[in-house]
Amino acid sequence: MDDVAKYNQGRWRRLVDANAVYTRLALDLDAESARRRLDPNGRLDPVDGKHVLVLAGGGGQQSVAFALLGARVTVFDLSDAQLARDRDVASHHGVEIRTVEGDMRVLSALDAAAFDVVWQPYSLNFVPDCRAVFCQVARVIRPAGTYYVDVANPYFVGIGERDFDGEGYVVKLPYVQGALVETTDAAWVAGGRSIEPAREYRQTLEAVINGLVENGFRITHLDEGVNTDPDPQARPGSWDHFNAIVPPWLSFWTVRDP
Ligand SMILES: C[S@@+](CC[C@H](N)C(=O)[O-])C[C@H]1O[C@@H](n2cnc3c(N)ncnc32)[C@H](O)[C@@H]1O
């Protein structure tokens, strides 16, 4: 395991211990709310009976949502603490979820062409080069399978609501593929507990789009600002205002060429 992975493993253990937002079990889901949560715009074909890989997506949210929709779910994550969350939520709902521990840059523990859907919630920015992940996904996904992946909006990596300077959100870091960007989570993320900063890596638009295309993924749709309901009237410097001005995430929908 390299230093990038070691750092994240330790940090995610502490985030789980603090019951941080991205580690909280989705206990109140049913099939209808699971579908709304995963796919509010109805882009995904039915997943009943399909093999779904939730990639670098432990924590007990997306895996269980797919399981409640009848999918055969594998969740792969670096953090055994996060995967324990998936096992807990599976037992709460009485569904089966397979958990596999590992680094998203090495998917050799998974069979080739095994998955109809690879679903990667926000995690790609925790490794220095997204292309190291795309080529692994290309091996484990079935021809014509769907790969959904979230990524930080490349232009705004490292900027948060705290960066409001009275006029706007200041862009100041160089636009360099793979550049390390450290950010401290807002206090609400881990219930006020102090955790070491996130170490993320900028993935430029060029690296993401060309990386997908070169690995045989056809982009079918792009969503900007995924899980937000932006409010430009919100207080400047608040999360809602920040979201309305600076969409923090992009979500790519792709299909693997047969
Ligand atoms: C923000 S969480 C995403 C999933 C979570 N269910 C959610 O909804 O927010 C990011 C996940 O990426 C995982 N992760 C970070 N680096 C990783 C790596 N190199 N390989 C696999 N997983 C990794 C973390 O352990 C964490 O569970």
Image (cartoon, helix red, strand yellow):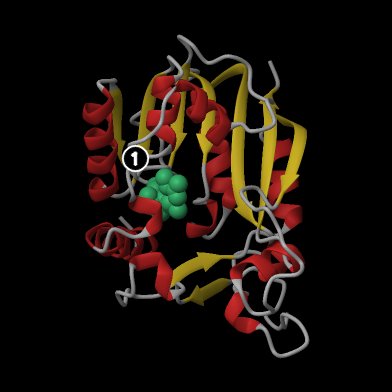
Quick check: 149 above or below 49? below
> Left or right of 76: which side holds 174?
right
Percent across and percent down for residue 231 are: 72, 62
Q: What element carries label 1?
A: loop
Nearer-the-camera pick, 139 or 122:
122
At a point 26% along the width and 42% down the height, the residue shown is 85
At a point 34% along the width and 40% down the height, the residue shown is 60
Q: Is mark 1 within 8 Å of ligand 1?
A: yes
At a point 71% along the width and 58% down the height, the residue shown is 230
Percent across and percent down for residue 82 are: 29, 47
In this figure, which residue is indicated by the disc labeled 1?
A: 60
Q: What residue occupies the far bottom of the structure in this picture?
A: 166
Quick check: can you spot residue 184? yes
Quick check: 182 above or below 13? below
Quick check: can you spot residue 216? no
Nearer-the-camera pick, 28 or 26:
28
Q: Residue 240 sits in which quadrant?
A: bottom right
Percent across and percent down for residue 35 are: 54, 26
Q: What's the amino acid at mark 1?
A: Gly
